[in-house]
Image (cartoon, grey):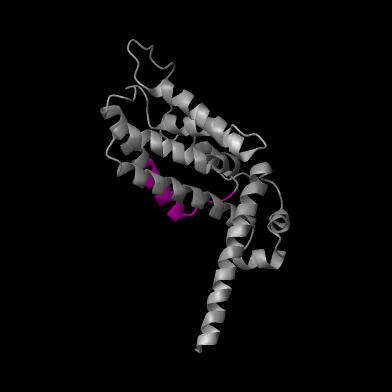
Amino acid sequence: MSSTSGKTLGGRRAQAARNDEVILEAARAVFLDDPKAPIAAVADRAGVGISALYRRYAGKEDLLRQLCHDGLRRYVAEAETALAEPDDWAAFTGFLGRIVDADVHSLTVHLAGTFTPTEEMGRDAVRAGELASALVDRARASGRLRPDAVVQDLGLLLEACAAVRVPDPERTRQLRRRQLAVLLAGLSTVPDADPLPGPPPAAGEFDWRWRRRE
């Protein structure tokens, strides 16, 4: 291969990567607004032809699966980073702050049940649960996390933050961080605090929403 053809190939790959990033950002915005939107709406928002989108994704389900798997991988990566933090409470709160800023759970709530997860996604979900449990265990051992909090509470906390949304993205970020601080205050140890009401969320209690909806 000549150097010229090599540069051309490299340029095409770079352009394909840029197109893919644009498509995924457009898909995220479109499906957050309306999970039932057609795939053509993604192409329109991304400013690419529908054929360019289909060259990368066989259909809408592939695109939805990619979006959710990207969010799951981000969750795993942030949890692994947090576990390297020596301060147990800072590791816990820092992880939650980064996940809230990344807006991972907005897609989880909107897209659950709209596609069939792969085995790889299942393995990553198990890994995500293991890492989150380790962070909760460390936070509890530090004495800063109330003893009746469970790892499943994190999902509810993150969904509560993801529900906060206004038209201005920066204001959304500010309000979500404020909501996170309020919720973390509720999870922090306080002398003579009343116990959390009701049975805690159980492992697998929210798995029902991942059942495929037609």
Q: Position of residue 173 (x, y in %)?
A: 56, 36
Task: Please give the name of the residue rendered at 51% of the width and 28% of the height, measured from the top-left corner.
Answer: 178
Residue 191 visible within the image: yes
Q: Position of residue 195 (x, y in %)?
A: 38, 14
Chain part drawn in magenta: 115-129
In the rendered image, the vertical position of residue 175 relative to residue 119, given as above or below: above
Relative side of 1 to 113, left or right: left
Q: Position of residue 49 (x, y in %)?
A: 72, 65
Task: Please give the name of the residue rendered at 69% of the width and 55% of the height, measured from the top-left corner.
Answer: 42
In the rendered image, the vertical position of residue 90 relative to residue 8, given as above or below: above
Residue 200 visible within the image: no
Does the magenta run of residues contain 196?
no
Please identify the quarter of the rendering in which residue 170 is found: top right
Of all residues shown, which one is farthest toward the bottom? 2
In the rendered image, the vertical position of residue 166 relative to residue 71, given as above or below: above
Task: Please give the name of the residue rendered at 59% of the width and 52% of the height, measured from the top-left corner.
Answer: 64
Count of number-bearing discs: 0
In the image shown, does 206 or 175 lie closer to the viewer? 175
In the image shown, does 203 or 181 lie closer to the viewer? 181
In the image shown, does 173 or 190 lie closer to the viewer? 173
Q: Position of residue 103 (x, y in %)?
A: 53, 41
In the image shown, does 209 or 16 lie closer to the viewer? 16
Magenta stretch, main secondary structure, is: helix
Relative side of 129 to 176, left or right: left
